[in-house]
Image: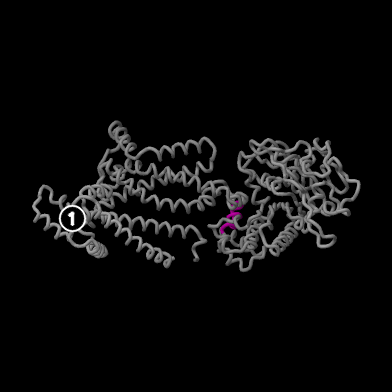
């Protein structure tokens, strides 16, 4: 597939061979990353802290601080048009209207000194010429859709008067009020109680079914992935090591890192033992290994892993960046 | 809100009492005899005794304090030992002059310091930020009196643009009054502008990296709105507090500035009163200043609550 093919792709968002380096860093923070999302579908980007999943999404939104990072390769095509990440004006128009984002910390993501109604109205008016009255009506309706009781009253509340779950609902309302084609959710449930987590995930899924928007869910929580993902991209140290339909990633993981992640999920059934972990830490930009970036922590690493691994295509859009893929045995059963 | 203000006022009362006792006692510990200062060449013990009796200086100190504070509560701050004018009247004459000077200095400091701080925070690490910081540091390091004298030499003596000294009441000729005050206000405001700039910069820097500023950007707001509305509104809280605290510095600075530009203000009144052992005036001035300072902080507290909805409903 050449780069031009993506322009005609039916997908809502196509990220192709995207590389990004922070100014002054010795290696790329995001290394030749490719993935795509279709309308109405959910892509989960999974990985440890610092693997580059948030940076990728912030780059997509044009939210990285100006001049902080350099894009070395690749392109992003959104709704059939190449995103011009270097044009802040164009990005601003897309941001918050066609492509929106919610964040990990609902407690601090809303401005503490403004009423939540005003903050939602502001999001509407940033992208349309709606009158105050219209914008307010739309905001109230949106709050109702995200399940906030007595929305007319809540409009006048300040963020500190709401619970964490309610605040995340407000964030979702703010993100969806302009009817976006793509929602990027950066660990939206991490800071919430487990019961609230489930509610928020369900809310996102319901709203997605209503609006047919595409969703990118960034998470390190495989429970969330299992709950919500259509496709999964497993990210490690700035590279996507494995991507494919969710059930294939869960049932037939091929990359040693994915296998490590899967086996670190505690099981309720079966033999009880020490919880499996992936030993070591994500390498920093200063000591990024050449070739396969996971080699330093990989139990199966061989000398060949010092060279760039090929992207192995498997059945059903399943891709693995590993010298040893596909695996000869189905590992899932032996875990 | 009203109960909040009332509570603050009640808390302020012991502070004022303490300050008044402190000032009163300190006065008594100062070397020098006010009666001697008053009598001048006169050394007749009878005259001195008469004066002591007249001003009740023979009473025990606690009694003197109570007499003074009792009268002060009714608005009588006593009579200047030197000019025989009521202290309140003296203060009433001089205070507006200093208030004008302080206000102009503060306005100048805010007009320069706050935008410069915002700008340098937004442009952090650039040449603009660097220049702003160097200028601010110079503003802090250059002594008032030197800057004042240099300005008089340049602007007044050499270029003859602004008058070197004097004062015109605002009510008499507003334009001229402000023109005369420009240079002193500039001198007095320079250090404040630098302080404000530094604090605005750091407040803005911490706010600019906050999650809600990222949310504001994620909404697609234009950068001006992100910075001036979402970020600055939050950075304002520490700035307001600082401004109230700077009021003390302002009064202290005014003393010096008024000397340089021979402005007949509060500062000059203080200096003259101290040198002349004019107890009643010094006490009155310190009391008024303390009350003013407490009032400014009360205003800051109120502003703090108005700015911060989290504090409002408690």
Q: Quadrant of residue A314?
A: top right
Residue at 59% across, 60% down: A134
Q: Quadrant of the C terminus of chain A?
A: bottom right
Q: Is residue A58 magenta?
A: no
Q: Is residue A123 positioned above or below A71 on the image?
A: below
Q: Main secondary structure of the magenta part?
A: helix
Q: Which residue is mark 1?
A: B85
Q: Position of residue B20 (x, y in %)?
A: 30, 59
Q: Answer with left or right where residue A90 lies relative to residue A278.
A: left
Residue at 69% across, 46% down: A50
Which of A36/A290 is in front? A290
Q: Chain of mark 1?
A: B
Q: Answer with left or right where residue B6 lies relative to residue B171.
A: right
Give the magenta range.
A118-130
Q: Answer with left or right where residue A313 lies relative to residue B101.
A: right
Q: Position of residue A14 (x, y in %)?
A: 75, 45
Q: Quadrant of the N terminus of chain A?
A: top right
Q: Circle 1 — which element?
A: loop
Which of A107/A270 is in front? A270
């Amino acid at each position: 597939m050449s780069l031009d093919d993506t322009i005609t792709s039916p997908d809502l968002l196509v990220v192709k061979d995207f590389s990004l380096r922070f100014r002054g860093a010795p290696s790329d923070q995001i290394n030749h990353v490719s993935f795509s999302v279709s309308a109405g579908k959910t892509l989960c980007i999974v990985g440890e802290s610092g693997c580059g999943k948030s940076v990728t999404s912030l780059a997509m939104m044009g939210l990285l601080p100006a001049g902080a990072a350099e894009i070395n390769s690749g392109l992003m095509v959104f709704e059939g048009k190449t995103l011009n990440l270097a044009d802040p004006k164009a990005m601003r128009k897309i941001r918050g209207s066609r492509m929106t984002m919610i964040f990990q910390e609902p407690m601090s993501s809303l401005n503490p000194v403004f009423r939540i109604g005003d903050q939602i109205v502001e999001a509407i008016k940033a992208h349309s010429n709606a009158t105050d009255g219209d914008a307010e009506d739309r905001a109230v309706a949106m709050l109702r859709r995200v399940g906030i009781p007595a929305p007319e009253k809540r409009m006048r509340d300040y963020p500190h008067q709401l619970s964490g779950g309610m605040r995340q609902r407000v964030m979702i309302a703010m993100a969806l009020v302009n009817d976006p084609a793509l929602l990027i959710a950066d660990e939206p449930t991490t800071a919430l109680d487990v019961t609230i987590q489930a509610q928020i995930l369900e809310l996102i899924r319901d709203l997605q079914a209503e609006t047919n928007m595409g969703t990118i869910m960034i998470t390190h929580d495989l429970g969330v992935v299992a709950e919500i993902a259509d496709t999964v991209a497993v990210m490690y140290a700035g590279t996507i090591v494995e991507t494919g339909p969710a059930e294939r990633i869960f049932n037939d993981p091929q990359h040693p890192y994915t296998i490590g992640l899967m086996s670190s999920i505690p099981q309720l059934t079966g033999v009880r033992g020490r919880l499996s972990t992936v030993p070591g830490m994500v390498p920093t930009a200063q000591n990024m290994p050449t070739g396969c970036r996971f080699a330093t922590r990989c139990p199966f690493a061989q000398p060949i892993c010092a060279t760039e691994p090929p992207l192995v295509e498997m059945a059903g859009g399943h891709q693995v960046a590993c010298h040893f893929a596909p695996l000869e045995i189905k590992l899932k059963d032996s875990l | 809100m009203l109960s909040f203000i009332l509570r603050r006022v009640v808390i302020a009362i012991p502070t004022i009492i303490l300050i008044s006792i402190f000032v009163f006692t300190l006065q008594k510990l100062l070397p020098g005899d006010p009666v001697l200062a008053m009598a001048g060449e006169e050394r007749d013990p009878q005259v001195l005794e008469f004066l002591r009796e007249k001003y009740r200086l023979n009473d025990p100190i606690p009694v003197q304090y109570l007499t003074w504070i009792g009268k002060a509560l009714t608005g009588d701050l006593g009579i200047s030992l030197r000019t025989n004018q009521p202290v309140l009247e003296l203060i009433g004459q001089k205070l507006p002059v200093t208030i004008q000077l302080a206000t102009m200095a503060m306005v100048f400091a805010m007009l320069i310091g706050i935008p410069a701080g915002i700008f340098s925070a937004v442009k952090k690490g650039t040449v603009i930020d660097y220049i702003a910081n160097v200028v601010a540091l110079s503003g802090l390091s250059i002594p008032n009196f030197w800057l004042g004298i240099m300005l008089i030499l340049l602007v007044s003596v050499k270029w003859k643009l602004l008058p070197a000294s004097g004062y015109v009441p605002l009510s008499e000729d507003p334009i001229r009054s402000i023109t005369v005050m420009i240079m002193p206000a500039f001198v007095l405001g320079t250090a404040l502008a630098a302080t404000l700039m530094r604090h605005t910069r750091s407040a803005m820097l911490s706010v600019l990296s906050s999650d809600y500023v990222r949310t504001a950007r994620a909404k697609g707001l234009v950068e001006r709105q992100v910075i001036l509305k979402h970020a600055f509104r939050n950075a304002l809280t520490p700035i307001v507090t600082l401004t109230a605290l700077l009021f003390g510095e302002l009064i202290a600075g005014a003393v010096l500035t008024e000397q340089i530009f021979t402005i007949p203000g509060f500062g000059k009144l203080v200096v003259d009163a101290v040198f002349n052992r004019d107890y009643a005036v010094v006490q009155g001035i310190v009391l008024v200043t303390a009350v003013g300072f407490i009032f400014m902080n009360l205003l800051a507290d109120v502003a703090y609550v108005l700015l911060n909805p989290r504090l409002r409903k408690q």
